Image (spheres, rainbow, N blue to C red):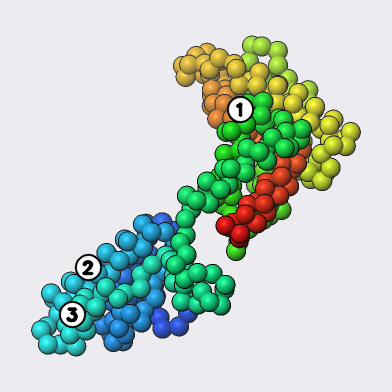
Amino acid sequence: MYHLIEQGLNSAQRAAVCQLKNCVVSAGAGSGKTFVLARRYAYLVIEKNIPVENILTLTFTNKAAAEMYQRIYKTLVEITTQANTGSDSHIRAQRAVADFHKARIQTIDSYCGTIVRRASRFYGIRPDFTIDQEEVARLTRTKAVPYVLKHRENKALQCLLQTGRIEDLAENLFVDSYVNHSNIANPADFSQFENAQRTEIKETWSNIVPNITENAQTVMSRCDTALSLKHEPATLAQLDAYFANSTSPTAKSMVEELLLWVTEIYAVYKLTLPRANSKKELAAVADGTSYRQNLLDVRDAYFDLTALVTYICNYPYIREVFPLIKEFHNLCDIKKRVS
């Protein structure tokens, strides 16, 4: 391999650069994926003598495509300046730089648009079509407010409208979800969203509740105010039953008990934080605990807890609003197809 292509690559990166079969490179942000792809591109040009117009490089965003274009071009230019004049590497790099305007480094959307234009007669559309997100957003906005007004008797929408204007609700809930998170080819899967939300809620609940309960009980045992936990938080089994039927009498009782328990946790949250050298704290430290730290832990976890409880209490409304959003998206798809 030409030394400039290989320079700076570790063994795993080198394997990805030289791979000639299908492969997946999985790595975190800032780990050098763009660097590796640029070197792989140069490897195909210099080592395998593949013209730039025969290499398809796809990214997700225009910004990433521009960055990739610059990175690859710079790599090829460096090879032309450092390779021995007349060598295969020098000749191939020079040809690639001269023909780089033919390089196909673009977004997936742009590439798909090219395919559709070339075969537009098979799809029944004009080849000079344009992709206009602003027009889609405009069409969506013209339908959003009337749709909200039409369903203003819906209990979920009534609940949401208590804290904002109809125009804001239409924009944030209906327009944004359609324009930025859904399209005809890949519509939003609201069942999947709901299941993912419930899974995340239960996982976070199982992590937060035991810790905040234990810390709150420790603080209550040492504080000067007579406090105690007389109520219980919901168990995971109770949450599962609640998510399955949030309107049953059992579900309502669980929510009432949960709110009483959160009120007791809030009483701990409001306690005055003692100084690190106070008698109360020094006594707690002497017993192998830290009243101050326990109270800080309660405070740190309290806002996450209230976010979870807010979701749980409003789950019936959340579940009811998903079908409305889905119906709105379907209406917009119909409008988009005929526009």
Find numbered disc 3 in the image and state the secondary structure of the residue it sits on. Answer: helix
Q: Amino acid at mark 2?
A: Lys
Write the residue at 57% across / 26% down.
Answer: 299
- Separation of residues labelled 2 and 1 (CA atoms): 51 Å
- Separation of residues labelled 3 and 1 (CA atoms): 61 Å
Viewer-proximal residue among 204 and 75: 75
- Which mark lies nearer to you, 3 or 1? 1
**Which quarter of the figure is the N terminus placed in?**
bottom left
Write the residue at 57% across / 57% down.
Answer: 339
Find numbered disc 2 in the image and state the secondary structure of the residue it sits on. Answer: helix
Q: Amino acid at mark 3?
A: Gln
Of pointers 3 and 1, the one earlier in the residue sequence: 3
Q: Position of residue 319 (x, y in %)?
A: 74, 43
Residue extending furthest toward the right:
249
- Separation of residues labelled 2 and 3 (CA atoms): 12 Å
Q: Amino acid at mark 1?
A: Gly
Write the residue at 48% across / 53% down.
Answer: 133
Which residue lies under the disc numbered 1? 164
Viewer-proximal residue among 76 and 289: 76
Q: Position of residue 115 (x, y in %)?
A: 47, 74
Viewer-proximal residue among 196 and 224: 196
Find numbered disc 1 in the image and state the secondary structure of the residue it sits on. Answer: loop
Q: Residues within 10 Å of mark 3 (few under 14, many from 20)?
A: some
Which residue lies under the disc numbered 2? 74
Which residue lies under the disc numbered 3? 94
Whether pointer 3 and pointer 1 mark residues with C-beta atoms closer than 8 Å, the reply is: no
Of pointers 2 and 1, the one earlier in the residue sequence: 2
Residue extending furthest toward the left:
85
Q: Is residue 56 left or right of residue 1?
A: right
Q: Is residue 152 left or right of residue 13?
A: right
Give the quadrant of residue 164: top right
Q: Residues within 10 Å of mark 1 (few under 14, many from 20)?
A: few
